[in-house]
Image: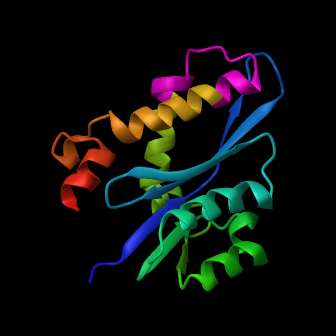
Amino acid sequence: MKKKVWLTDVTEFRLDGKEDKLYLSPILDVFNGEIISYSISKKTNIQFTNKALDEALNKFEILEDLVIHSDQGFHYQHNSWIEKRKNRGIKQSMSRKVNCLDNSPMENFFGLLKQEMFYGEKFKSYQHLKIEIEEYIRWYNIDRIKEKLNGLSPVKYRLQSA
């Protein structure tokens, strides 16, 4: 049986003309590129990344042969993250130090998100940017087609493959 692989990472966005930042931590299913959960926060702390993991874990009863891949960030080495993962029998994989290529599908998603939604726009408030990111993720999963998925969106591809 083929292993199921999820990817995760954190990216940041800066509000227009401010030092304020917004952080996004999604979990991406490698099978179809779908963002299965995410967390958005003003702070990059343990609760922030754990929220995305909890949301993903709550969506699935059975997670046989699942590997979750991340960078070596402190979030993914924290005891709470490790316990949540181990309690569900999930294996962990981490990128080599300073090697974003090990997590390239996630980096690709971040690039698309920023190119298609963020760059060239001016977001003055945290709430406005948060809403736009949430809408983009919904659109990306349900409507945005991918050539490698036979011209289907991630959700449509998953449903067709079920």
Q: Which residues are magenta?
A: 115-130
Q: Quadrant of the C terminus?
A: bottom left
- Using residue 65 as the reference point, say whether residue 121 is left or right of it: right
As drawn, 19 above or below 123: below
As drawn, 89 above or below 63: below
Across the whole image, how many numbered discs are drawn on residues? 0
**Residue ID at (62%, 67%):** 97
**Residue ID at (84%, 27%):** 19
Image quadrant where residue 158 sits: bottom left
Q: Quadrant of the N terminus?
A: bottom left
Q: Position of residue 154 (x, y in %)?
A: 32, 47
As drawn, 156 above or below 30: above
Residue 104 or residue 31, whichever sits in front: 31
Q: Position of residue 145 (x, y in %)?
A: 27, 36
**Residue ID at (49%, 31%):** 136
**Residue ID at (73%, 17%):** 16
Q: Position of residue 141 (x, y in %)?
A: 39, 42
- Taking the magenta stretch, the answer to whether it contains residue 122 is yes
Residue 121 or residue 89, whichever sits in front: 89
- Using residue 8 as the reference point, say whether residue 152 is left or right of it: left
Asked whether residue 35 appears in the rendered view, the answer is yes
Q: Position of residue 56 (x, y in %)?
A: 55, 61
- Using residue 130 as the reference point, say whether residue 79 is left or right of it: right
As drawn, 15 above or below 60: above
Asked whether residue 78 appears in the rendered view, the answer is no
Residue 90 or residue 94, whichever sits in front: 90
Image quadrant where residue 94 sits: bottom right
